[in-house]
Image (tube, rainbow, N blue to C red):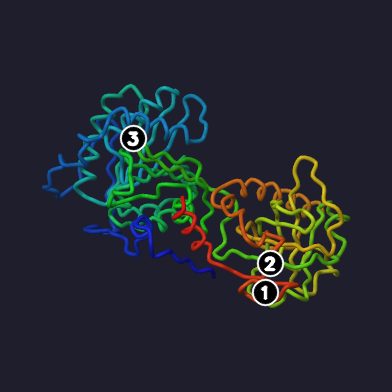
Amino acid sequence: MQRFQFPVSGLFIQILCASILCCKGFNPSSPAYINTKPGNLLAIKNSSQDYDDLRDESDVDSESMESLASEIFRNLPHKEKFSNVSILDLGCGTRMLWEKLIEEAEKSSLDLQITGVLDSHKLAKGASKRSSQLLQSHSDSNHEIDVVQSSILHHIQSLDKSSKFDCALLNSWIVDQSFELRDILVETLDHGIEKILIYKAEGVDSNDSRSLPQNSIEVAMVIHQLPLKLSKLVNDSYYFVALEKRRGVDLEYIHRYKGAVSNGYGRGGKKLGVPTANLPSSLFQQALGDVGTGVYFGWAAIGGHPGKTFKAVVNVGYSPTFEGTENKEKIIEAHLILKNGEELDDFYGSALTLKLVGFLRSERKFDSFPALIAQINADINDSDSLLDETPFKDLREDNIFDMSKTWIGSGGGDEDASWEFSLMLTAMESMAGSS
C-alpha cells in the first residue's frame, strides 16, 4: 500500500488536511432531515436555540455572489432545458448563494435540487427556515432544497452509490473548522460524485489565517494521489476551485531511470503498431523489485536528440497477453509519443532517460490482441492529455535529461544503468515555494 505524506510546511496543508474530524455536538446515528419544499417546513424538535445567527451575510457582496453562482453553473455538466440540476451542498451555502443559484437555473429553464448538509443543529434550523422562505418566493417553480443535520462525512457515507448528484459544493468554512478535506474528497468520489467545487464568498490571501491553496501546485498537493484534476481556480472577489474526476493519479514517488536501449521482443512495433524503447531487464531488476506492474506515464529523452523531451507511456511488467512468450523478468517498455510527423531513427543502443510521474492502470491479460491494442491506444491518448495538466506538465524539466552530463541516481546503478525514487510531494513543495 502506498503511503501518503504531507509536507510539514505550508499553512494551507495543515488546515486542509488536519488529522481530526471536527464533529462537535452531533450523534451520527440519528441525522435530522428537514425538507423545505414550499409550505412544508419541518422544524427540528427539542431546540430552544435561536436560528437568526446563521452565518452573517452582511459582508458578502451581492455581485460577487452572483459571479460565484455563475461560475458554479459553468462548471456543471450540460443539461437540457426543463431537466433537473442536483447539488450536494456540504456545509450549506448562505441564502444569498442559493438565491443566485436558483436565478442561474431559471436562466436556463432548469429545476434546481439542493441537499444542504450542516452538522450544527442551530445552523440547520436557521438554514431550513431561510430556504423555505426562499422557495416560497419561487412557488411557481419546481425547485427543492432539503436541509440535513448530519456530520459531513457521515452523510456522504450514508448516500446510496446510485445517487445522481451533478456536483458536490464544499463550503470553505468546513476547512476552516479543521474537517479532513481529503476524507471528504475520497468519500465523495467513492459515492459516484465526479465534480467537487470548493468555494468561499470572498477571496483569500496569504495573510488569511485560514488560507486555502492559492495556485495549481498547492491544489495538486491537496489532491495528491487522488484521481482528481483541477479544472478551474479563481481567487478574486470570491474563491473557487473546481475539481473533477480523471483517469490516472500522480505517483507517491517519482521514478527516474537511465540506461541504453536494448533489443526487445519485436512485439511493440510489429504486432501492436506501437514501437517501444526497452531498458535492459538484467540491469534493472534490483530497481524494479518493489515497483508495481502496470502502465505509467511521464517524460523521456533519448540520445541523439539534445534538449528534447518527449511525452512517454511506459509499461512495467511481464506482457501477460503474449501467452507462452511472456517476459521472464519484469521489464520497462517505453513508448515515446511523437507529434506533428516527428520520427526517431533506430534508437537501439542510445541512452534513454525516463522520469515517471503518474500511474494509469495495473497490468492485466487481455482476451485478444485487438482488445490490447484498443487499450494501449487509450493509454497513449490519456497519457498525452494528462501530461498537459498540473502537476505533470510542471515536472518536465529535470537534470536527468541533460545528456551532456553523467547522471547516477541515488537508488543504485552506475554510469551504464542507474535509477532513483524521490517523493512527489517534495518536488511539489519546491515548485509551490518558487511560484
Percent from the top left, x then y, of residue 365? 75, 63
Q: Distance of mark 1 from mark 3, alpha carbons?
A: 50 Å
What is the count of numbered marks?
A: 3
Q: If you read the primary sequence from the N terminus, does the residue marked by circle 3 or circle 2 appear first?
A: 3
Q: Distance of mark 3 from mark 2, alpha carbons?
A: 45 Å
Task: Check residue 257 in the rendering and tell me which mark sits there, or answer none.
Answer: 2
| Local SS, label 2 | strand
**Identity of the residue drawn at 76% across and 49% down:** 374
Q: Distance of mark 1 from mark 2, alpha carbons?
A: 9 Å
Tags 1 and 2 in contact by the CB under 8 Å rule?
Answer: yes
Task: Check residue 303 in the rendering and tell me which mark sits there, or answer none.
Answer: none
Q: Nearer the viewer, residue 199 or 402?
A: 402
Q: Nearer the viewer, mark 3 or mark 2?
A: 2
Percent from the top left, x then y, of residue 288? 68, 73
| Local SS, label 3 | loop
Residue 302 to residue 242: above or below:
below
Crowding at dot 2, Cα within 10 Å, few <14 / some 14-19 / many 20+, comes out as many
Tags 1 and 3 in contact by the CB under 8 Å rule?
Answer: no
Residue kind at label 2, given as amino acid type: Tyr
Crowding at dot 3, Cα within 10 Å, few <14 / some 14-19 / many 20+, comes out as some
Q: Is residue 417 left or right of residue 174?
A: right
**Identity of the residue drawn at 21% across and 49% down:** 121
Please name the residue that numbered disc 3 is placed on. 237
Please name the residue that numbered disc 1 is placed on. 287
Residue kind at label 1, given as amino acid type: Ala
Q: If you read the primary sequence from the N terminus, does the residue marked by circle 1 or circle 3 appear first?
A: 3
